[in-house]
Amino acid sequence: MTTTPVWSVDPRTGKQREQVAVEATSQEVDGAVRAARAAGGALADASARAAFLRTAAALLDDAAAHVIEAADAETALGPGRLTGELARTTGQLRAFADIVDEGAHLDIRIDRADPSLTPPRPDLRRYKVPLGVVAVYAASNFPLAFSVPGGDTASALAAGCPVVVKAHPDHPATSELCASLLRRAAVATGLPPEVVCVVHGFDAGLELIRHPLVSAAGFTGSVRGGRALFDAAVARPVPIPFHGELGSLNPVVVTPAAAAERAEEIGGGLAGSVTLGVGQFCVKPGLVLVPRGADGDRLTTALTKALGETEPGVLLDHRMRENFVAGVLARAALPGVEAPVTPGSGGEHTVGAGYLTVPAARLLDDALGGAYEVLLEECFGPVTVVVRYTDQREAAAVLARLSGNLTATLQLSAAETEGGPGPAAELIEQVTGLAGRIVVNGWPTGVAVAPAQHHGGPYPAATSHSTSVGATAVERWLRPVAYQSVPDALLPAELREANPLGLPRRVTGG
């Protein structure tokens, strides 16, 4: 049998480091899914599930030096960034363990029988059960937090679903290392190691989404890749939920009053957000509406200075570098587009940060035949497009051309933040229809892992209305079941009248 090796590659040099694995055959994908399904029953024990998640976090923390070294060697993201990402990853695992212990995610609702109602109400008891095997597609730009030990895996396991992860080719060694730690944690807490399985290879990813025993999938990546998997998920004989985070432009609107009040501060902050992680965050601001005039000029002058002082950086792989350079060239070649700081190649293995500018009228001129639509598409890397607008009407018209986003940011003046009817309130209303998270006087880069967080948005930001970050991410892997007039002794323990597990529940009737 011919096998295709999976190599770990150093993005700083483009050279192969080591062979990590081989691409999984269809038979091996089938074996991984079946093994995960067979192991899944053990996850029904909530105490073991919570202990597993906490033990996994502890093992990752104990191996921090090794994990960070491996991830940096494959991604060039740097120890500082990766140290923070590992803390976020282990924090997610512990947070989902707390969610399992609390039990509120089961959303238990009990309506006791009431024959006096018209029509009479039978005894109804509802809670949520795990879907089954979840396929997780790891992200390139987060080798920990959105990959093997990341949020999709943690939330699926918290729901009681075993996981098969399709590892990302940009960090296979890191994926294998983290998988081994998760499997060790499973064994240490009395669970089968197969509750987490990993496969490699493009074809393996297609086999995984089509496997009849896979019940749902989570994905973080490009629009093209995510849409292909989404289409495969819904084309199955039995379609399955596909929770994909795809592309996002993450627009920013700077009001004239905000520019007058703190142009230099906004310009410097924008530069920092655009270049964070070499522009490889899914919430990087890719389109910025800046008012024409002296205050807007002050802002772009500060942006020019900050980006001009930014050192070239290494992208996650050479394919992404080539796409970035080509994408910037195509955008810069459009008539009327200028590059005050030219983004693009920064050397053989690096890229330079920069930005492009264009008058808003160009984006709104239908006579141009849509040539400028490319400026309204995500360009992965350290670049943003500054759109100069003349008035609020023009800014609103540009926003109306945008598709769904993960975030939308408003830079407002102090007076505008005091509320009440007016342009700021109108902007809030408009961008609420565009994005899953609205930011005021901050920057979208940095997604807090918190119960109220939402990381998603209208398509193509995401393929569903769920979140991939925060406590409610667990809901993606559960489905509700109602039991009507079922004798108490036959009910699941979670729904019995005496509440033997001590779970939170909402009860109606005496």
Image (cartoon, helix red, strand yellow):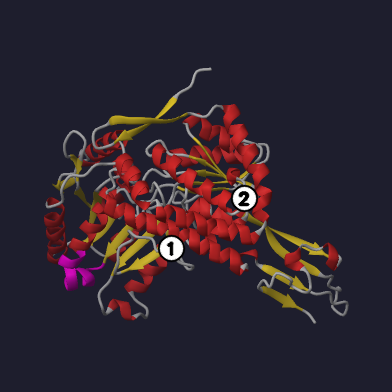
Q: Horizontal placement of 198 versus 426: left or right?
A: right
Residue farthest toward the front in the current orientation of the protein: 188
- Residue 276 visible somewhere in the drawing: yes
In this rendering, the label closer to the viewer, 2 or 1: 2
**Taken as a whole, is the magenta stretch helix, strand or loop?**
helix
Q: Is residue 258 magenta?
A: yes
The picture places residue 135, in percent across and down from the top left corner, at 56, 43
The picture places residue 463, in percent across and down from the top left corner, at 51, 49
Residue type, label 1: Val
Query: Magenta part of the protein: which range?
Result: 255-266
Neighbourhood count class around disc 2 (C-alpha, 10 Å): few under 14, some 14–19, many 20 upward: many
Instruction: Assign a secondary structure to mark 1.
Output: loop
Foreground: 67 or 493?
67
The picture places residue 342, in percent across and down from the top left corner, at 15, 44
Q: Is residue 369 above or below residue 412?
A: above
Mark 1 = which residue?
449
Q: Residue at x 21, y 57 (%)?
A: 271
Residue type, label 2: Leu
Neighbourhood count class around disc 1 (C-alpha, 10 Å): few under 14, some 14–19, many 20 upward: some
Mark 2 = which residue?
191
Along the polypeptide, which appears first: circle 2 or circle 1? 2
- Residue 486 visible somewhere in the drawing: no
